[in-house]
């Protein structure tokens, strides 16, 4: 019976997210991940500083610099939910409205579909989004550009563009209904 049993792997993840105040406007952040893995063959420990960035807040303007997590707010993460290295600028003229611009490099995008010139799984990424959130409703629209060599329908491409939009309604703090759509009208 044991000969047909799949090997078991257990992983314990420890994630630390330290924050340090630099001055009245700037803070420094990091995310340190440690995975403790045990399987039928061996034990392994992997450690990684997956994020390290500074964040500045000047009134209604926010800036992030370094390696941080970014998220396509307009479509509730449908287009982007990954770590990037670069800069992100957010301007919120009111509590309801927000405009965000991101310019960065990303690794791991599309899990091997996107390749740079030196055959690394990385790409340039930039995006602009406008989002509205008021009470239980939220809505947004965004434009994303990913630049890297990749294959689309057996043809090598150098970049692709994605437009996304989304709307959401929160019934309460535990239940939210969202509808999101993304399309790539400008495959080059």
Image: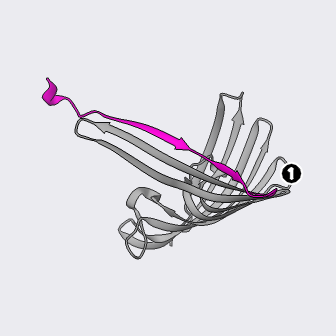
| Magenta stretch, residue numbers | 1-26
Front position in the image: 14 or 84: 14
The residue that label 1 is drawn on is 94
Q: Residue furthest bottom?
A: 117
Q: How is the image coloured?
A: one colour
Q: Is residue 9 left or right of residue 113?
A: left
Q: State whether residue 18 is above or below residue 158.
A: above
Does the magenta-highlighted stretch encompass residue 24? yes
Q: Helix, strand or loop at disc 1?
A: loop
Measured as percent of width and height from the top left, residue 62 is found at 76, 58
| Residue beneath the point at 65% across and 29% down | 175
Quadrant of the rendered structure where residue 113 is? bottom left
Measured as percent of width and height from the top left, residue 118 is found at 39, 75
Q: State whether residue 50 is above or below residue 155.
A: above
Q: Is residue 178 left or right of residue 96?
A: left
Front position in the image: 53 or 141: 53
Measured as percent of width and height from the top left, residue 161 is found at 56, 65
| Residue beneath the point at 52% across and 42% down | 15
Q: Is residue 71 visible?
A: no
Q: Is residue 184 visible?
A: yes
Does the magenta-highlighted stretch encompass residue 98? no
Measured as percent of width and height from the top left, residue 48 is found at 46, 53
| Residue beneath the point at 70% across and 29% down | 173
Q: State whether residue 119 is above or below residue 39.
A: below
Quadrant of the rendered structure where residue 121 is? bottom left
Q: Which quadrant is the N terminus positioned in?
A: top left
Q: State whether residue 142 is above or below residue 96.
A: below
Quadrant of the rendered structure where residue 55 is? bottom right
For the image, the number of numbered tags is 1
Front position in the image: 104 or 172: 104
């Amino acid at each position: 019976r044991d000969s047909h049993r799949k090997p078991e792997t257990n992983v314990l993840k420890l994630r630390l997210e330290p924050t340090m105040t630099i001055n009245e406007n700037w803070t420094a952040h990091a995310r340190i991940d440690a995975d403790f893995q045990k399987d039928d063959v061996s034990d392994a420990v992997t450690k990684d500083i997956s994020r390290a960035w500074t964040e500045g807040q000047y009134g209604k303007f926010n800036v992030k610099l370094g390696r941080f997590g970014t998220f396509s707010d307009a479509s509730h993460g449908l287009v982007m939910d990954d770590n990037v290295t670069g800069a992100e600028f957010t301007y919120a003229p009111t509590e309801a409205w927000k405009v965000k611009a991101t310019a960065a490099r990303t690794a791991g995008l599309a899990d091997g579909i996107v390749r740079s010139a030196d055959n690394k799984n990385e790409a340039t990424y930039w995006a602009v989004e406008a989002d509205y959130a008021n009470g239980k409703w939220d809505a947004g629209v965004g434009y994303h550009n990913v630049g890297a060599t990749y294959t689309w329908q057996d043809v090598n491409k150098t970049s692709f563009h994605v437009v996304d939009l989304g709307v959401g309604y929160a019934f309460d703090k535990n239940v939210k209904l969202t509808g999101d759509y993304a399309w790539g009208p400008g495959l080059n």
